[in-house]
Image (cartoon, rainbow, N blue to C red):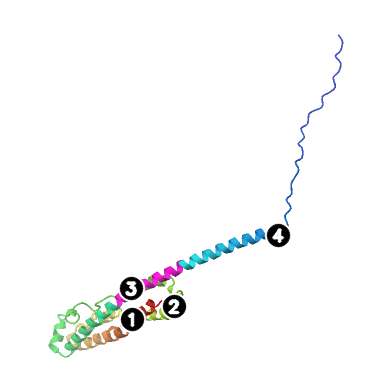
Amino acid sequence: MKDKPATPAEEPKTHRKKDKPEVYVLRDIKEYLGESVLIIFSVLLALVLTEYFNGLHEKNETKELLKNIKEELVKNKKAEAEQYTYQKMVLKNIDSALQSKEFQQKIIVNDEFHLKLLAPDGIQYRDLSTVAWEVAKSKDIITKADFALIAKLTDIYAQQARIDKLEDKVADIFLTYDSRRQENIHTSLVLMRDNYKGWAFDRAPSLIAKYDEAIKMMEEK
């Protein structure tokens, strides 16, 4: 048999990827500056808008807080005027008791103190609210409102707090053992009268005037 002629060895096929040309975009300094300016402007605009809306919200909140305080002062003024009239009657009853031994004997009977003979509707005739003021302080109203108004309101609510101590002060007198002795009733009545005057009655006219001043200040805002 004849040998088959040798065939040349096949060369392995290779797949070569053609290198893709890379495109470089040349940008000048003006384009970079333009983009930078646009970014900075966008950030500043966002900050300005945020500040504006925060300020608008704060302004509206402050306005609402002052409105609530004003309404509270109007109610407290009415309550304090009524309380002043009531306390005038109580003081008149105390003076009558101080001048009458017979009246004094009716106040302390079997070691029991009969308050209703002097103050038929209790020591405190009306409550003076502080809710709106406390809420406003929690919202930092002191740094947001006019200084003169804040000073006036602070004084008003401080006076209210002193008036509110009257009940405790009178209780300190008549919840003691010695005050229930018949021989001490005159002294107890004097102490009661002095507490009424010192803590509440003598403060009322000034407080009512301050209510008017504060309400007027808020109406002018």
Mark 2 crowd level (few <14, some 14–19, many ≥20, 10 Å Cα) = few
Q: Are marks 3 and 1 in contact (CB under 8 Å)?
A: no
Label 2: element kind: loop
| x and y, in percent, of residue 80 in the image | 28, 79
Tell me, yes or no, if residue 99 can be seen here.
yes
Mark 1 crowd level (few <14, some 14–19, many ≥20, 10 Å Cα) = few
Q: Is residue 60 magenta?
A: yes
Q: Nearer the viewer, mark 4 or mark 3?
A: 4
Furthest toward the top, the residue is 1
Amino acid type indicated by mark 2:
Asp
Q: How many angstroms separate mark 4 from mark 2 (CA)?
A: 50 Å
Residue to which mark 2 is pinned? 146
Residue to which mark 4 is pinned? 30
Mark 1 vs 2, N-terminal side? 2
Q: How many angstroms separate mark 4 from mark 3 (CA)?
A: 61 Å
Mark 4 vs 2, N-terminal side? 4
Mark 3 vs 1, N-terminal side? 3
